[in-house]
Amino acid sequence: MDIRVDLRSDTVTKPSPEMRKAMYEAEVGDDVYGDDPTVNQLQEKAAEMLGKEAGLFVASGTQGNLVSVLSHAGRGDEIILGDQCHIFNSEAGGVSVLGGVVMYPIATDGEGFLDPELIHGAVKPRDYHKPPTKLLCIENTHNASSGRALTPEATSAMADAAREHNLRIHLDGARLFNAAVAQEIPVSDLTAPVDTATFCLSKGLSCPVGSVLVGDADFIEEAGRWRKILGAGMRQIGIVAAAGIVALDSMIDRMSEDHVNAKKLAEGLAELPGIELEPSLVETNIVRFGVPTGSGDRIAALLMDQSVQINGGGSDLRMVTHYGIDSEDIDFTLIAMKDVMAQVS
Ligand SMILES: Cc1ncc(COP(=O)(O)O)c(C=O)c1O
């Protein structure tokens, strides 16, 4: 069946006509030699926007986080991160598998914030029984907390705690531009307190591939070495990077539409029987909600019959708005959900 509304993730977005044109026309070179002018332009532009010295184009958000952690911490070192974060839960333990890095998760407060007291308590004393703590990882927006956007103040509070122990700070900003747009602030306000940050081009920014990692020049040089080790030194990759430049020029401001649509979706869903959801907590493009125990897969299957696609689950479901979703799609989804929830509640 044809799917009319795909709310599984903002990763399902397809490149805009302008991106396809830019990709077709992109000037390219061998990026392993640093010769690709389009990649260089994207990296410089991203670094400037995020207020850092340099940038590195990587294949995915997972790769950006992996390269970053491996550049900050070595075998037997420890990193502190939230127990609900993507690096800990959804990146197949890559930093431990490939880098021998120990992950030490601490509780997240439901908004993606890590209490500074917990950060202080997690740092290991100098003791050869313990792995040396090197890095704090934070995430903005926080995927598991319904896309909550951390403020610059919250970011600074966590970073300040980490700096007291000479830790470095990495920000997984897969959806960082959503956080900036939601707060109507420059994205650099959210990266100023951290040492390094990644953001994804292939989520709300709608590019087909890629993420960018930023930091100081020495860090980016080391990150380039790790990217090579991971087999991701890419050649005429300007063809893909070209879409990223278009995205940074033209796809950021429009994210506010995704946020309006997510809010409308949340408000509509909250009225339906069997759904647990607090619409005021939806700040960006992710809507998470509770459904009757164990009914998630059935809801997803019934929605599919109505041409609306979401990921299944147990008792928690997620819908994500994006470039491919308009206000009428939200109306369509709410009508379908009303019918589906009448069947399962
Ligand atoms: C917060 C967060 N970080 C990292 C990633 C990984 O991105 P990718 O799927 O490009 O590897 C995701 C993907 O959804 C994410 O939500």
Image (spheres, rainbow, N blue to C red):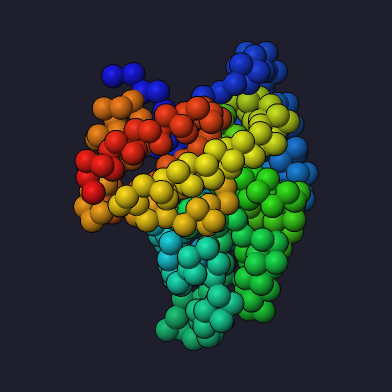
Left-right relation of 85 to 220: left
Q: Tell me residue 152's x, y (percent).
A: 70, 61
Q: Is residue 6 left or right of residue 67?
A: left
Q: Is residue 314 left or right of residue 224?
A: left
Q: Quadrant of residue 332?
A: top left
Q: Residue at x 71, y 41 (%)?
A: 46
| Residue 275 placement, left or right of 239 | left
Out of 214 and 160, give the one closest to the viewer. 160
Q: What residue do we see at 39% from left, 52% from top?
A: 289
Whether residue 115 is visible here, answered yes or no, is yes
Residue 128 is situated, as x and y percent measured from the top left of the image, at 46, 84
| Residue at 68% in and 36% down | 252
Residue 61 shows in the view: no
- Which x, y percent locates residue 163? 67, 74
x 29%, y 30%: residue: 304
The part of the image, by quadrant, that contains residue 303 is top left
Q: Is residue 205 above or below residue 89?
A: above
Front residue (pair 252, 279)? 279
- Figure label count: 0
- Can you say whether 153 is above or below 279 in the image? below
Vertical position of residue 111 compared to residue 300: above or below: below
Q: Quadrant of the N terminus?
A: top left
